[in-house]
Image (cartoon, rainbow, N blue to C red):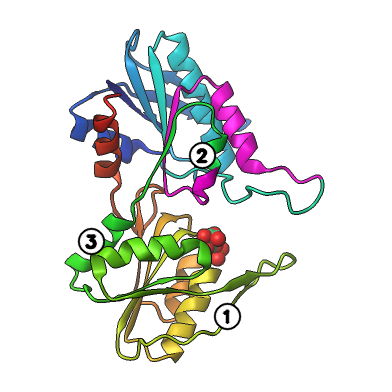
Amino acid sequence: MIVVPGPASQDLGRKVADMLKSKIVPVIFKTFPDGESYLRLDGDIKDEEVVIVQTTGPPQDVHIMQLFLMVDAAKHLGAERVTAVVPYPAYARQDKRFLPGEAISIETFIKLIEASGTDRFLTVNIHEEGVLKKFSIPAENLSAITLLAEHFKNKGLAGAFSLAPDKGALELAKEADKVLDGGCGWLRKERSRLTGEIRVEEKRFNIEGRNVIIFDDIISTGGTIAATVKMLKTQGARGVYAACVHPLLVGEAQRKIMQGGAEEIVGTDCVPSPVSVVSVAPLIAEALAKTGV
Ligand code: R5P
């Protein structure tokens, strides 16, 4: 197996290759003056199983295009099979049409991945797991929540309450609770379609004097977590921590959450960021090794 660490996941790709003791084929890449991407796979991959690791966090469209260019180039070089490991899959949050004329962006993303020649798709905590059924190539979703929860347990936070900031994240909180064992719950959240503003429904939990860890798949603007942290602090929580798989941390997200009273934000390297302290490399390497890519 040969691992190609894409421009957006250089460190993670290398870690995965090290764990699998696989050869790396590097990508030479640059941006043309007009903004287009150039890349070249620098090695022999003929008849090989090739794993391309490329996340699609901001700037999403550039990273997606680079992914397509890498898959296509790998096919042209004669790769036997190409697995796209996309730790953060962009465009996954719109999986329904709310208004006529809207694109269901995850469907478009899937069609384009398949059209690029990808033979197999692997991702981590995709926003809505049900969308995997829309793939016609094998597609697998891994979960980094246990790794995140173990990180907190190792910091002495066993017994903390695991909270989902919305119903969609409840499975994440339940998974974390298997490690932390302090109980779990969820909130109801509304986002204004007009302003994007978040409103978290007031709900009381038995958390006075206790540590609470909020688990979500994505932190984008930080609005969801900041509003949740504030509510938990008014209920007397001792320390409130934010954990997410995909720390997009757009604009002032980090500042907003910390000013709301959070102790810390912890994310994974699905999206490289200043808070990406938990690596998903073991998770990805294990999945690749198991299926013998
Ligand atoms: C949405 O349902 C997701 O799970 C996250 O809660 C959301 O993307 C977070 O966005 P923001 O950080 O902008 O509130």
Q: Is residue 31 above or below residue 196?
A: above
Viewport quadrant of the N terminus = top left
The reply, left or right, for residue 210 in relation to residue 199 is: left
User: In front of the other: label 2 or label 3?
Assistant: 2
The reply, left or right, for residue 15 in relation to residue 134 is: left
Q: Position of residue 123 (x, y in %)?
A: 42, 40
Name the amino acid, label 2. Answer: Leu
Give the farthest residue toward the right: 100
**Ligand 1 position by quadrant:** bottom right
For mark 1, give the secondary structure: loop
Upstream in sequence: badge 1 or badge 2 = 2
In magenta, the rendered stretch is: 101-130
Q: Position of residue 11 (x, y in %)?
A: 31, 40
Residue on which disc 3 sits: 150
The reply, left or right, for residue 201 in relation to residue 254 is: right
For mark 2, give the secondary structure: helix
- Measured in 3D between alpha carbons, the distance from the residue under mark 1 to the one under mark 2, in whole angstroms, is 30 Å
In the depicted view, which residue is nearer to us: 231 or 162?
A: 162
Q: Position of residue 36 (x, y in %)?
A: 59, 29
Residue on which disc 2 sits: 132
Residue on which disc 1 sits: 201
Name the amino acid, label 3. Answer: Glu
**Label 3 near label 2: C-beta < 8 Å?**
no
The reply, left or right, for residue 13 in relation to residue 67 is: left
- Residue beneath the point at 59% across and 38% down: 61
